Amino acid sequence: MTNIKDVAKKAGVSVTTVSRVLNNHPYVSEEKRKAVIHAIRMTNYQKNINAVHLIKGKTNLIGVVLPYFDHPYFSLVLKGITNQAIKKNYKIVLFQTDYREEREIEALQMLKQKQIDALIICSRATDLSIIEDHLQFGPIVLCEDIKSRKFSTTFVNHYTVFHKALAFLYEKGHRKIGYCIGRTSGTNSHMRELAYREFHEKYHLPYRPEYIIDQCIYFGDGEKVIEKLTTMMDPPTALLVTSDQVAAGIVISCQKRGISIPDNLAIIGFNNEPIAEMMNITTIEIPLMEMGKNLFLQAIDDAISSKEIIVKLIERGTV
Amino acid sequence: MTNIKDVAKKAGVSVTTVSRVLNNHPYVSEEKRKAVIHAIRMTNYQKNINAVHLIKGKTNLIGVVLPYFDHPYFSLVLKGITNQAIKKNYKIVLFQTDYREEREIEALQMLKQKQIDALIICSRATDLSIIEDHLQFGPIVLCEDIKSRKFSTTFVNHYTVFHKALAFLYEKGHRKIGYCIGRTSGTNSHMRELAYREFHEKYHLPYRPEYIIDQCIYFGDGEKVIEKLTTMMDPPTALLVTSDQVAAGIVISCQKRGISIPDNLAIIGFNNEPIAEMMNITTIEIPLMEMGKNLFLQAIDDAISSKEIIVKLIERGTV
C-alpha cells in the first residue's frame, strides 16, 4: 500500500515536505505543493479515516478507564457501556490501569489529543484536580459521588448502602462485624469506611481496624480472608464483602473447613453476580449494566448530569 | 474549543472550503487557502493527533474482536493482550460482537480505514474468505488452527485435546460421555465434534447427538445442563465441559440435587480458571493469558507465524 514515503519519492520531494503539504504548513512552494498533490493522485494514496476525523473533530471512540476488567463488577459495567456504544455506533478504547496513575494520565492525554471523543473513568487513582484540568478537551464521566457539577456522574451512594447493610446485620444480633474491600483508597472506599466508623459510634461498638480486610478482589481472595479470620483471637461473626466473587470464595473456603454459614459466620455480598444466586448468597444488588449504560449516555451528552443508582438487599441463605 | 466551523467563520469561507484546504483538494483558490491557513493560526485550531496519524499511517490502536468479554475465557485472553499492549505502548479497541457478522465486518472496516493498525480475532462468525480480503489493509491474527500461511495464528489443537480427555474418561470406565460447548459452529467447535465422533467410532460406542449440549457459556448454564440430563432416559455418566464456569455451575447444581460427583457424574472442565481450583474441578489447563500475549505480539509483527499452545490435564476431584 502507498505510504507517505512513496508519495515523497513520486513527487521528488522529502517526506517532510509531503508532511508539510498534508498539514497545510505555509512554507512550501506552490510548485512543490502541486507536485505532492499530483503524486498523491498518481499513487492512489489510501484515503485515511484519520483525515475524516481531522475534519469532523470526532472519532466515535470513547475511552473507558478501569483497573481490571476480568472481574464481574467491572466487566458488567463495561458490558453495559459497550452494549449501548454498539447501539449508538461508537467503539470503546480500553484503558486497563491496575490503578496506576500514569496509565490514567495516558487516557487523559488521548482525550486531549482527540484520539477519543470522551472518557469514562470507572475507578481511579489520579487526583480529581488533574482530571478536572482535562475537561476542556471533552466530556469526562465518573462513577462516584463527587458532588461536583463539572462532571457527569453515575454512582451508588455507598455510605447509605453500607450503613443499611450494617444495620441489617445488627438487627440479626451481630455485634462483631467486619468488611472486605478491594482497596482502602478512592471515594467509594472512603464513603464505606466513614459509614462503618459512624455505625460503630452510633451503636457504641468498638471500632477494630483488623476487621477491615483489603485487597479482596478475586474469587481466591475468599480463602485468604478465612485464613486471616482463623488467626484472630476474636474474629467477626459477620462480614460485608464488597464483591460476590470474594463472598463465593469465602463460602467455599468455609465449606472446606466445616465453618457453618450463617451460624458461625454471616455473609452479605455485593453486586448480585450470577454466582451469588447459584450459591444462595445474601447480597446487595447493584444494577451494573444499567450503570454502564448510563455512563455511556452521559459520555456522549454535552450536558452535565448526575444519577444515583438505587440498590437493594436480596435476602438469601448466608445471613 | 475551536472547531472547523470557527475556522470557516473567521476565514469568511464555507466549512467545505476549510475541509478542502485540510484535505489538499486542488480546487481551492490560493486566496481562500491563505485565508483558511491564517484563520487556523488566529483561532489556535487545536493540534489534532489524527493529523499525526494521517502522516505516520499508524494509530497505535489494535482492534480485538470477541463475542463477549464478561467470561473468564475471553477476559483472560484479553488480559494477556492488554498487558502486552501496555508494555508496547498500544491501546486496545474492543469489538464485542455476540457473534454477529456485521460487527465483525465493522472491525474489518476500521482496519481498512486505518483507525486501527491490526486486528486480533479471538473468535468469529464471518467467513474466512471475507476476512482474508482485508489482509491487504493490515495484520489480522486468528485464534484457531486454520492451516493457512496468510494469517498469523495462536491456537490450541482442540482435536487432540478432546480426544485425550475422552480417552481419559474411557480409561476410568465411562462409556456414556457427553460434552457441553458454547456453540456448535466455528473451527474450534468443529474440531471438537470431529474428535468426539471419531472417538466413538474408534471405541465402537453409539454416537448420541443429545449428549452434545450447546449454548453453555455462563455459570448459570450449569443448572440448565443438569435439568436437561434429568429429563434423559439414559443420561451420560461423564461430561467434558468446555468452560470451568459452566463446570462450576454443574457442580453446584449437583450439590443442590444430591447428585454425587464423580460417582453419579464425572466432570472435566476447561481453562483452569480460579474457580476450578477452589472447587476442586478436574480440568484442562489452557494458558489463556499466554495466548493473549502471543496474539498481541503477532499483531504488531509483519511476519506471519503460527504457534500451538500446549495444554495439560489437571487431575482433581471431579473424575
Image: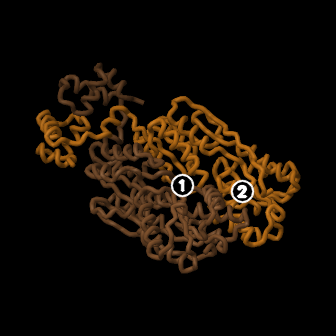
Chain colours: A brown, B orange
In the rendered image of this protein, does residue A225 appear above or below residue A106? below
Front residue of B128 and B87 = B87
Tag 2: residue type? Val
The answer to whether dots 1 and 2 both sit on one chain is no
According to the picture, the residue beneath numbered tag 2 turns out to be B241
Neighbor class of circle 2 (other Cα within 10 Å; few <14, some 14-19, many 20+) is many
In the rendered image of this protein, does residue A40 appear above or below residue A204? above
Tell me if B59 is positioned left or right of A274 in this view.
Answer: left
Front residue of A41 and B261 = B261
Asked if residue B209 shows in the view, the reply is yes
| Distance (Cα) linking label 1 and label 2 | 31 Å
According to the picture, the residue beneath numbered tag 1 turns out to be A215
What residue is shown at x 46% (from left), y 45% (from top)? B92
Asked if residue A91 shows in the view, the reply is no
| SS for dot 1 | loop
Specify the quadrant of the image occupied by residue B55.
top left
What residue is shown at x 88% (from left), y 55% (from top)? B173
Q: The C terminus of chain B is located in which quarter? A: bottom right
| SS for dot 2 | strand
Specify the quadrant of the image occupied by residue A55.
top left
Tag 1: residue type? Gln
Tell me if A289 is positioned left or right of A267 in this view.
Answer: left
